[in-house]
Image: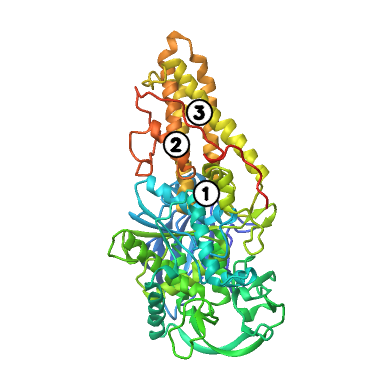
Amino acid sequence: MFVRKVNPDEFQECYDTLCQELYPWQDVVNPPFNSMRCVVEPGKITHIHNHHEGETFFILEGEGKIAVGNETETVGAGDVIYLPPFLNHTLENTSAQNQLSFITVWWEDMKLAAERAKMTTDKTRVVSGKNVLVAPPPPTPNGDLHLGHLSGPYIGADIYTRYLKLRGVNAFYTCGAHDNEGYVLTTAERLGLTGRELADKSSDAIRSTLKKAKIEVDHYWRPDNSPEYLDFIHGFFKKLYSEGKIVKKETPSFYCKSCRKYLFQSFVEGKCPQCGSTSQANSCETCGRSNHYNDLIDPQCKSCGDKPVERPLAKFYFPLKPYEKQLREYYKTVKMDPRLRAICERSLLDGLPERAITQVTNWGVSVPMEGFEDQRFDPWFELAAGQCLFGTQQLSRSLEQTSGWERFWKAEDGNVVQFFGFDNGYFYALLFPALLLAYDSSINLPKVFVNNEFYRLEGDKFSTSRGHAIWGSDFFDQFSADTVRFYLAHTRPETQQTNFSQAEFERTVQRELKDEWNQWLEEISAKLQEEYDGVVPEPGAWTDNHRIFYRELSKFIEEVEFAYEAESFSPQKATRMLCELVRTARRFSAAENYLRGIETKKDELRTSIALELAAIKTLTLLTAPIMPDFATRLWQQLGDGTTLFEGNWKKAPEFVSAGRKLDNFPLINPLPQSVEEAVPIGI
């Protein structure tokens, strides 16, 4: 017999509980399960988590509340709880005085884990309403969009919007211009322009580039284009200030004696207090975390290089700390990638700050308070109200709706999905949700954040301010939108930085789109003409090879659909699956060619041709969000007269209507229609 006594020294912290391992019992027994004795201290709650094992809790003493997924239940001594794999769960001790103790037993069953993994993955879609707002960040109009911008949120958001429209969802892409960002002013000063001149010129260029990239914007807004904008921002501020959610306080602020101006955001540079990288005030582009200009190490004026002095200055601040609990609850449900989640978690552990929302400058939206006539709102504060609410309100009006911004932000059938680069993550995932909750606690915050890393150009970061860029407008004048969109999706910087190389772009277009896709389309066109005079045959007898190929097509649909969903968004994966679909179809075609000319196999050959045409129809739908022009031309040949992006998504491969006369299939043209020969673009 072996007896193990409770030893407080053996307890260790695990998932925010105190735990003592029971089994396996070293040098005694190693059973096919693990077990611990655990204690949740008064008023505490375990860290939310899930795992691949099955698990059972035996409550020994105390009382509390178990939360599993969206379900909660009160538990107490004597209760037994079973937790299937991959279900998020927490156990809260609801007593302020007594401990909640329990025994946990868990075991590994990989068959059960695989079944549960598939079940939970199949249910990942959280964007389920009939109205979806897709919102990338308003670009800063200090220049045109370059390929780095386009590869991330802008083409990504368009791909997702088009996918939703294929599914029959009312999806709307809204965008604007971040006119009042400090980079507009610093760039304008360097170019000898006024901020307004540069903003107007750049915004026009941005809209032109979006159009060339086949990015369909349902509503494009600019602060100066609406007389209501100023009143809306002022009203947003006044409501928060009157409710005590914005405070006025005097703090030391940076001032450059040489330039005779206060420094903030892009006007001051130093080293990030978190990671030590070179950073401007506001946020660090290396670690993605927020900083206050006073926190910068070795700060200097960006204009003249002098070290600033500190002067007391009264400004308005928004304290984030009161929203910590609401943010933590929100993070349990919102979908985001691990990098962004880490930024949020580290920011919470650092302690949420009071953020200055006004600065001394003559650029931006005025502060409607006496004595602050020389200050303007911080552009990120302004953007929370301007992009999220005002821009959406303008969209609703353009759609002749009377519900305003509430249509997407408060309605039960409304969803918001935001796309942005990781360097904006702090603002979209922490500041904006806190401000919106402060403004109206019943707002439905975004359900998914789709984040991306930096796209590099020949190994270095794209930069508008440094001119290290390939401008989108120039590139789309040289190459077709379909081919550029394909390559930017193929190399999209999703969870790590990726690199653009024009030589690799041209090699990929040649290897994948011309040598594989176009070749396959030409082969099928020729075969259809030779065997059936271009008329689509009825499917005939099926073989094992036919059934295998049909099953493969079905799997491609499932995988690409998963890659287009916001929760698992990956155009990189989608393009690779599309290329593999074409290779699989070419292998199938080559094998089935042996049936040609054999009279006794003509019924099987009809099925082969019909399946190849079904593969083209499948490719048409799967590639449409990425290559809309190419897909639209194919759909006009293969479809049933419907408009492609109006609910035509299919869950299974479908045959092209028998008896339909088909001409040669349209091919992917790497050049725009007006350009016969591409030339290299200088950087």
The amino acid type found where label 3 is placed reads Leu
Q: Nearer the viewer, mark 2 or mark 1?
A: 2
Q: Is residue 501 above or below residue 233?
A: above
Residue 166 percent coordinates (x, y) = 38, 45
The amino acid type found where label 2 is placed reads Thr
Instruction: Please tell me which of labels 2 and 1 falls first in the chain.
Output: 1
Q: Secondary structure at mark 3?
A: helix
Frontmost residue, 179 versus 169 = 179
Q: Report whether 392 appears left or right of 30.
A: left
Residue 278 percent coordinates (x, y) = 69, 70
Label annotation for residue 570: 1
Q: Is residue 351 visible?
A: yes
Mark 2 surroundings within 10 Å by alpha-carbon count, few (fewer than 14), some (14 through 19), many (20 or more): many
Q: CA distance from mark 3 to mark 2?
A: 12 Å
Q: Is residue 12 visible?
A: no
The amino acid type found where label 1 is placed reads Ser
Residue at x 33% of width, y 54% of height? 130
Residue 451 percent coordinates (x, y) = 53, 58
Mark 3 surroundings within 10 Å by alpha-carbon count, few (fewer than 14), some (14 through 19), many (20 or more): many
Frontmost residue, 240 versus 32 = 240
Which residue is tagged 2?
620
Q: Nearer the viewer, mark 1 or mark 3?
A: 3
Frontmost residue, 670 versus 590 = 670
Residue that lies at the very extreme toward the top in this rendered image: 599
Which residue is tagged 3?
521
Q: CA distance from mark 2 to mark 1?
A: 18 Å
Quarter-of-image position of residue 288: bottom right
